[in-house]
Structures are given as structure tokens and as C-alpha cells.
Amino acid sequence: MRTWIAAAVFALGSGAASAQVSTHIEQCQAENATIDQLIVHCTAAIKSGRMTPMQEARAFLNRGVAFFEREQYSLALRDYGLAAARDPRLPTIYANRANTYVRMGNPAQAVQDYDRALSLQPNDTQSMIGKGAALIQLSRNREAAQAYGQAIRIDPEDANAWFNRAIAYMRLNDPASAISDLNRVVALAPEDAEAYVSRSRAQQANGDLNAAYQDLTRAIEIDPAYSFAWYRRGRILHDDGREEQARNDLARAYQLGLDDPWLAEYIATLSRR
């Protein structure tokens, strides 16, 4: 999920000290700054005591982004909380904090923060998609589909929203709706092998093994090193009694390093023949 860097508007007095603080503030909100640079400059800007509350909020937010990228999630949460205390109207604080809660395995808290971000920025499709992912983790699949649907209505060209709603539909045992959404993903991203593999699963769940086979074949054409596509196609062939073709696909999946207990036992059985 996306993280945001917030820009700060500042006005300080003249002099060398002010110039140095200005440099720290500029570097704290620079989009091309490295993680280490963000932490150093945002910390220096905060410690200067010469920023307004809004400027401090953006400095804490951006340092939180840096800690998030370092996977120091507790520190990121701390800084997002400090940012919110200084400027509670900044939606990116809550969106970034929600992303952090997801990473920390706390989807319920993430949903609350995504809702807060959306109350401040109602058309933020990335927060809608993030909320959907958190709802999926909570097994609130219908609500997740609704969240993705909101994003789709705002941006019908967002393949990620269509893809994720298809996942929600599969969890709702609605493969027909999942296929419809994945058709849209394939139209938007025709070279995305994962879209074909996902659609193959929906096709299989919908009882159309031929369509599932064709989608897996297309995925393999796009990415010949996609071990799971070889495996899925091999399983379809195996279950359909086409053992010689299945053997070739499953052996290829194994050669590509797919770690699956059934596959390991299958290959071991072949070697004993």
C-alpha cells in the first residue's frame, strides 16, 4: 500500500540558524530524500522548535513514513500519533497509520483509520482499497467488496480495485462475479500473468475447466517461470486423467522451485516408479 510524503510550507526569519532550519524542513519533505535523510532532517526540524503545529505535523508524518519503510512500525505509529495531535485534519496521517496497522496484523484498527482518512478525503481510492484489504483480513468480505466497488466507481481504470473485488467475491463463493471483475482486469492489464491465474481459479470454481486451462496457458506464455501456473495447469490435467501432460507440467513446477507438499509427494512417487 502507498505511503505519503507531506510537503510543508514554512516561513522563518533571516540568519544562519534560520537557514539551517529551512534546509532541514526542505529535506524533511523532499520526495527524493532517502529514508535516513528523512529521519535526520525531520528530527532536526522537529527539535528546532521553530515550526508551526501544521509544519510539525508534516515532519512527524514524514518521519513516520521513513520508520514504516524501515519496518520500525511502533516508531511509525508513535510519529503518526504525534502528527495527528498537531494537525488532526490531515487525511494522509490516518491513511499511513492504517497501512501500518495492517502490517502489524491489526486490521480492525486499520479500518477505523481508513474511515477517518475517507471522512477527510472521500474520493481517496487508495484508502478504499486499503480498507477493503483490512476487511478481507477480518472476513468481512461483503463489506470489502463494497469498499472496492466505491474505488471502482471513482476510478474504473484501477485494475487493482477490480482484482481485489474479485478476491472478495471468491471468498463470498461467487465465482461468476469474480470472473466478471477479472475480465476487466485482463482488459486493463493484458500482460499480467497473475490476473489469468486468478481468473483460472474462478473459472474452475465455476465449473469451466477448459477456460481455466486456457487462462493458465496464457499465464505461462506471459511468464514461463511462473511455477504456480504450471502447477495449477498440471493439477487440472491430473484430475482430468491426462497424466502424461500433467507429469510434464508438474515436473516443471517442481523444477522452478514450487514448495507444495502434494507436489513433493507426486514427484517422489514418480521417482520410485
Image (cartoon, grey):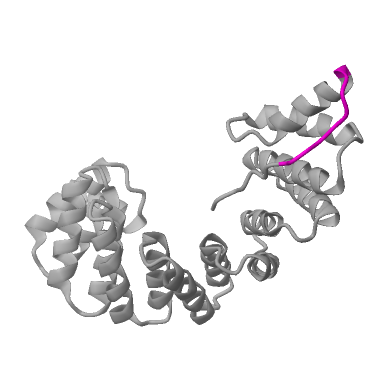
Determine if residue 171 is in view: yes
The residue at the point 65 percent across, 32 percent down is 35
**Is 25 inside the magenta-drawn segment?**
no
Q: Position of residue 164 (x, y in %)?
A: 42, 66
Q: Please identify the quarter of the rendering in which residue 196 is found.
A: bottom left
Q: Please identify the quarter of the rendering in which residue 24 is found.
A: top right
Q: Is residue 42 above or below residue 218?
A: above
Q: Is residue 146 above or below residue 94?
A: below
Instruction: Judge from the rendering whether residue 31 lies leftward or rightward of residue 85; answer left or right.
Output: left
The residue at the point 24 percent across, 62 percent down is 187
Label the magenta part by its dominant secondary structure. Answer: loop
Q: Where is residue 84 in the image (x, y as percent from the top left)?
A: 80, 56
The residue at the point 8 percent across, 64 percent down is 242
Q: Farthest residue toward the front?
A: 14
Q: Farthest residue toward the right?
A: 49
Q: Is residue 139 above or below residue 51?
A: below
The residue at the point 23 percent across, 73 percent down is 203
Give whichever of 56, 242 is nearer the camera: 56
Q: Farthest residue toward the top?
A: 16
Q: Where is residue 201 in the image (x, y as percent from the top left)?
A: 28, 68
Determine if residue 239 is in view: no
Instruction: Judge from the rendering whether residue 197 lies leftward or rightward of residue 138; answer left or right.
Output: left
- The mark tally for this picture is 0
Give whichever of 183, 7 is nearer the camera: 7
Q: Where is residue 68 in the image (x, y as percent from the top left)?
A: 66, 44
Instruction: Judge from the rendering whether residue 8 lies leftward or rightward of residue 166; answer left or right.
Output: right
Q: Give the residues in magenta.
A: 8-16
